[in-house]
Image (spheres, rainbow, N blue to C red):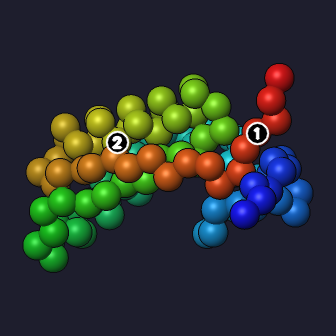
């Protein structure tokens, strides 16, 4: 099985489903993302959910990944649901060098 070559967002390379290619490189606006996530978590809790899985691996650099994981950690501490972070990496490999 051959690994697909990395292509930047907007190219024809592999991209995560459901995420607009242009958003991949831009960090999300924390307040807006936090509010949407808290609203979703509140709704999950209302239906009796106790644990959710949150994916990381959508950032193309360490700083983006740390930002995503930091948000998972903050949200986990702010509300009663348990958030389990799972790395879902290697959608495509960035260029080396």
Q: Considering the numbered disc 2 on the image, is that residue within a helix, a strand or a loop?
A: helix
Q: Which quadrant of the figure has residue 59?
A: top right
Q: Picture coordinates of residue 39 (x, y %)?
A: 31, 60
Identify the residue at image location x=56%, y=48%.
89
Identify the residue at image location x=65%, y=54%.
91
Identify the residue at image location x=29%, y=36%.
73
- Mark drawn on residue 79: none
Q: Which quadrant of the figure has residue 13?
A: bottom right
Identify the residue at image location x=41%, y=37%.
69
Whole-number angstrom distance, CA of label 2 to CA of label 1: 24 Å
Q: Considering the numbered disc 1 on the image, is that residue within a helix, a strand or a loop?
A: loop
Tell me the crowding category of disc 1: few under 14, some 14 to 19, or many 20 or more residues within 10 angstroms, Cα based.
Answer: few
| Identity of the residue furthest to the right in this view | 11
Tell me the crowding category of disc 2: few under 14, some 14 to 19, or many 20 or more residues within 10 angstroms, Cα based.
Answer: many
Q: Picture coordinates of residue 31 (x, y %)?
A: 45, 41
Looking at the image, can residue 10 be seen? no
Identify the residue position indicated by label 2 in the image.
Answer: 72
Identify the residue position indicated by label 1 in the image.
Answer: 94
The one nearer the camera, 38 or 63, is 63
Looking at the image, can residue 83 be seen? yes
Instruction: Determine whether, in the image, residue 63 is placed left or right of residue 32.
Output: right
| Identity of the residue furthest to the bottom in this view | 47
| Identity of the residue furthest to the top in this view | 97
Instruction: Determine whether, in the image, residue 44 is placed left or right of residue 70.
Output: left
Q: Picture coordinates of residue 25 (x, y %)?
A: 71, 42
Q: Picture coordinates of residue 52 (x, y %)?
A: 26, 60
Q: Quadrant of the C terminus?
A: top right
User: Which comes before the other along the chain, label 2 or label 1?
Assistant: 2
Q: Which of the two discs, 2 and 1, sits closer to the camera?
A: 1
Q: How many marks?
A: 2
- From this view, report whether residue 96 is shown above or below residue 16: above
The one nearer the camera, 40 or 96, is 96
């Amino acid at each position: 099985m051959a690994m697909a070559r990395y292509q930047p967002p907007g190219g024809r390379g592999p991209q995560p489903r459901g995420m607009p290619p242009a958003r991949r490189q831009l960090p999300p606006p924390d307040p807006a993302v936090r509010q949407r996530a808290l609203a979703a978590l509140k709704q999950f809790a209302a239906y009796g959910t106790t644990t959710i899985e949150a994916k990381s691996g959508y950032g193309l650099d360490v700083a983006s990944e740390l930002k995503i994981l930091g948000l998972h950690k903050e949200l986990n501490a702010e509300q009663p649901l348990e958030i389990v972070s799972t790395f879902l990496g290697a959608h495509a490999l960035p260029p080396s060098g």
